């Protein structure tokens, strides 16, 4: 047999063995390179987290929408799909399966829950903060945000919550030499500083909702932040946690707080804490908190004052009697410039709520007359002993003695909006039963539903005090505001209202959601934004269930409006002009009950 090495002239066996050794060595190096590459390959949790972050970024940038269709393949031009597929996060679905960006998001969130880590927690936190910077009450944004929010609450992995805790504690913007700067470590290639600030807000709120006392001290420290939004998130978080140990901290924070929304949130935290733990809180501590709240009357607008009155109504204190009598005088327009304790735009409900609280504090049954209350207090204040009590009944009844009424509901607001359904079904002729007179006797009115609504609206406006303001909004398939801004209820404005009402014609569908969003001024609102409206009372009249607009599902409408009105604190009364106890009536009844209003079916 011939020697194969002899085929190459000058190629000796020694040289051949050197080649074999070299090939073997290069093979080992290649295997090491493969192993190193495999070790650098991102884990499944990292891939899922990166895909989620890209989804959030593209959604907030307007590049994708929740109901947008998805073409699913590895080289998709949609970045988050490409990341998820190429990283092996999930396999391709069946070809005939209809997919949207929201269903893809749901799949990613499920994977994030199954693969908890610092990375997936950070991505879910970004999801939970979606829309906080602007348009936070857009219902699609709320759907997205809640998906991340509840996913995080379901995760119990320590690594995930260590990350959430770290984000909650970290101040992104710091003062250096008198100027605000951002740490380089905190700069993110996908998200700017404002977006990351929203992550912190979401993290703080989640710490409270997780209801773990270990987070309490970190949340309390956030009350000292220079960012009002962070302080608001901390106040809301402590409200979710509602531990008696935080009451003194909240009381101190309230005394120095300047942001009106944070003040309201702190007062609500005190109320919720006392509601839950009144019997365990030392009387001196609770008394200090209630007196501190009373000291803020008139300093932060009527919404803050209303929160204080409702707090005292639930937890009576003797020191509130004299300030509340002055509130009653204010609501009647009897303003003493020296003793004035509320702003000029204060809701007239404030005096009525003060009257309810006075009756609960003292146990006295005296009419809504400040002079009679002053006389009573001068003679009996040394005899009155105020006992600690639990939360009071939330039900309210007000007489229509001062001002007009709408379908028998007293018009008591300082700035009132009448929201009238002008859909096609409002042309139906009916015989409506409507309360008449101050004693609530029932009378009968005949005509179309819209004609009766016009007469009731005009009657309510004509009965309003001259210093009150009103506006008219109508809705069918579209929403129309007849006033650029609320007008004072003078004679000329009442004539204009009569002219406006005379022009209304029934047509189209029932777009009640867009009408409510317009009235509550909830478009493009960011977390911590101060309400710009002074509207304190809304009357909504409709004869059917929602059938047009962005949202038609009654449950979804109720959920969104309740979230918006948590900040606005506007009483929403509802009149159902339809027949029977159908879904429209149930929707209107719940809308009123959840927003402090009265429901009437005519």
Image (spheres, rainbow, N blue to C red):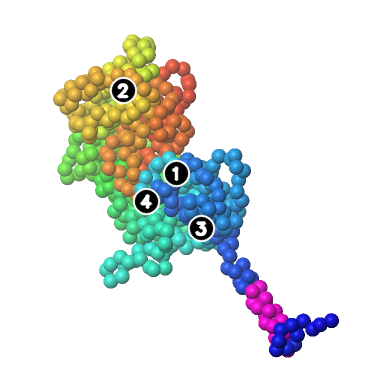
Callout 4: helix, strand or loop?
A: loop
The residue that mark 1 highlights is: 65
Pointer 3 local density, CA inside 10 Å: few below 14, some 14–19, many at least 20: many
Mark 4 crowd level (few <14, some 14–19, many ≥20, 10 Å Cα): many
Asked which secondary structure carries label 1, the reply is: loop
Residue at 27%, 43% in the rendered image: 532
Q: From mark 1 to mark 3, how far is it between C-alphas? A: 19 Å
Residue where numbered disc 3 is placed: 50
In percent of the image, x 60 and y 45: which residue is there?
A: 93
Residue 238 visible in the current orientation: no
Q: What is the residue that sits farthest to the right in this orientation?
A: 1
The mark nearer the N terminus, 3 or 2, is 3
Q: Residue 28 sits in which quadrant?
A: bottom right
Nearer to the camera, 68 or 197: 68
Look at mark 4 in the image and give the residue it sits on: 133
Circles 1 and 3 in contact, beta carbons < 8 Å: no
Residue nearest the viewer, comparing 266 with 327: 266
Residue 588, percent across and down? 42, 27
Disc 1 crowd, CA 10 A, few/some/many (<14, 14-19, 20+) = some
- Could you classify mark 2 by the number of other residues whose Cα lies within 10 Å: few (under 14), some (14-19), or many (20 or more)? many
Q: Position of residue 250 (x, y in %)?
A: 39, 55
Residue 29 in view of the camera: yes
Mark 3 or mark 2, whichever is nearer to me: 3
Q: Which residues are magenta?
A: 14-32
């Amino acid at each position: 047999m011939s020697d194969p090495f002899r085929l190459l002239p000058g190629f000796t066996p020694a040289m051949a063995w050197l080649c074999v050794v070299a090939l073997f060595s290069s093979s080992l190096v290649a295997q090491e390179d493969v192993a190193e590459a495999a070790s650098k390959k991102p884990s499944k949790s990292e891939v899922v987290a990166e895909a989620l972050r890209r989804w959030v970024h593209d959604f907030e940038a307007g590049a994708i929408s929740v109901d947008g269709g998805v073409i699913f393949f590895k080289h998709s031009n949609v970045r988050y799909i490409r990341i998820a597929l190429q990283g092996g996060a999930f396999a391709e679905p069946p070809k005939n399966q209809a997919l949207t960006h929201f269903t893809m998001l749901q799949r990613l969130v499920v994977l994030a829950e199954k693969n908890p880590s610092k990375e997936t927690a950070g991505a879910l936190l970004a999801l939970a903060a979606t829309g906080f910077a602007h348009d936070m009450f857009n219902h699609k944004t709320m759907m997205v945000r809640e998906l991340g929010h509840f996913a995080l609450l379901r995760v119990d992995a320590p690594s995930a919550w260590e990350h959430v805790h770290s984000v909650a504690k970290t101040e992104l913007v710091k003062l250096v030499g008198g100027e605000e700067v951002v740490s380089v470590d905190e700069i993110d290639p996908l998200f700017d500083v404002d977006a990351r600030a929203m992550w912190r807000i979401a993290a703080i709120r989640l710490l409270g909702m997780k209801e773990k006392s270990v987070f309490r001290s970190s949340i309390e420290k956030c009350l000292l932040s220079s960012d009002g939004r962070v302080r608001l998130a901390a106040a809301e978080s402590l409200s979710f946690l509602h531990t008696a140990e935080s009451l003194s901290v909240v009381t101190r924070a309230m005394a120095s707080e300047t942001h009106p929304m944070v003040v309201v949130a702190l007062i609500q935290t005190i109320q919720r804490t006392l509601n839950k733990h009144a019997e365990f809180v030392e009387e001196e501590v609770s008394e200090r908190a209630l007196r501190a709240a009373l000291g803020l009357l008139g300093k932060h607008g009527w919404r803050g004052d209303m929160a204080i009155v409702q707090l005292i109504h639930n937890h009576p204190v003797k020191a509130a009697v004299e300030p509340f009598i002055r509130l009653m005088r204010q609501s009647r327009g009897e303003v003493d410039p020296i003793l004035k304790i509320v702003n000029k735009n204060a809701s007239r409900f404030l005096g009525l709520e003060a009257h309810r609280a006075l009756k609960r504090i003292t146990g006295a049954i005296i009419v809504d007359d400040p002079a009679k209350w002053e006389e009573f207090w001068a003679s009996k204040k040394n005899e009155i002993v105020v006992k600690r009590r639990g939360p009071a009944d939330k039900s309210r009844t007000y007489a229509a003695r001062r001002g007009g009424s709408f379908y028998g509901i007293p018009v008591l607001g300082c700035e009132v909006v009448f929201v009238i359904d002008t859909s096609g079904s409002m042309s139906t002729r009916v015989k409506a039963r409507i309360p008449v007179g101050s004693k609530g006797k029932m009378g009968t009115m005949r005509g179309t539903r819209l004609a009766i609504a016009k007469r009731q609206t005009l009657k309510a406006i004509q009965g309003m005090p001259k210093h009150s303001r009103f506006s008219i909004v109508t809705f069918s398939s579209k929403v129309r505001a007849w006033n650029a801004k609320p007008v004072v209820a003078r004679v000329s404005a009442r004539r204009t209202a009569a002219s406006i009402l005379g022009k209304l014609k029934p047509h189209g569908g029932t777009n009640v959601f867009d009408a409510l969003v317009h009235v509550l001024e909830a478009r493009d609102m960011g977390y911590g934004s101060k309400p710009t409206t002074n509207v304190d009372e809304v009357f909504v009249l409709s004869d059917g269930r929602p059938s047009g607009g962005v949202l038609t599902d009654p449950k979804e409408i109720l959920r969104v409006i309740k979230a918006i009105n948590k900040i606005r604190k506007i009483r929403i009364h509802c009149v159902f002009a339809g027949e029977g106890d159908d879904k429209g009536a149930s929707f209107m009844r719940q809308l009123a009950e959840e927003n402090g209003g009265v429901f009437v079916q005519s």
